Image (cartoon, helix red, strand yellow):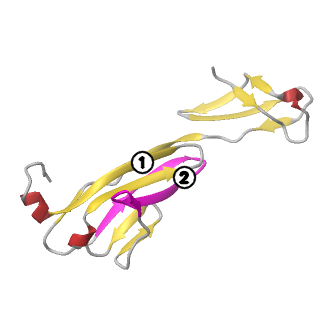
Amino acid sequence: MEGLRVNSVYGFSSYFRGFYKGPLWKNDSLKCSLFLCSIKFICCCCCQVPLKFVARPQRKVASSVPSGYVMECDVTGQPKPNITWLLNGKQFTGTSRISIKPNRLVFSIIYGGDIGVYQCIADNGREMVQSSAVLITAGMCARTTSCSL
């Protein structure tokens, strides 16, 4: 059912509680409402836009020559999501060589100890999405047949 559910209106009794069908502004998955209630005051409700990945972490096969790398995780939505990183299922807060910037991990140089599954979790308090990527070395790739660049 499309419409707006009002659970309470600040400063007024529960008289206004209910489900209103009215002018909805829709743009793809964006749903906002602004409607005029019967006693001539405006009820404005917050917009909620589902979380959507703009850029997901990508699998990386690190070469034997030390190099840097940027692993991106860009998610849009309303309310704006917070990004958390995990490494092998545990919260990752960065190191002296791997810094956490908005929407990305920046590896100044990749070492063998950096290999693992990096997971990006976006949470805005209403929903959560996640994506992950594996960072492996070229030497590991040579030992397996499931590795393609």
Q: Amino acid at mark 2?
A: Pro
Residue 4 has which mark?
Answer: none
Residue 91 spot, x, y in % from top left: 43, 62
The residue segment tinted magenta is 69-91
The residue pinned by badge 2 equals 81
Residue 38 spot, x, y in % from top left: 89, 26
Q: Amino acid at mark 1?
A: Gln
Q: Identify the residue at image location x=49%, y=57%.
A: 83
Which numbered mark, 1 or 2, is in the foreground of this view?
1
Residue 99 spot, x, y in % from top left: 40, 72
SS at circle 2: loop
Q: Where's the C terminus, which quadrant?
A: bottom left
Q: CA distance from mark 1 to mark 2?
A: 11 Å
Q: Nearer the viewer, residue 52 or 96?
A: 96
Q: Identify the residue at image location x=63%, y=20%.
A: 1
Give the overall secondary structure of the magenta segment: strand
Residue 130 has which mark?
Answer: 1
Q: Badge 1: few (under 14), some or many (20 or more) residues near its Cα, within 10 Å?
A: some
Q: Is residue 106 magenta?
A: no
SS at circle 1: strand
Residue 7 drawn above or below residue 84: above
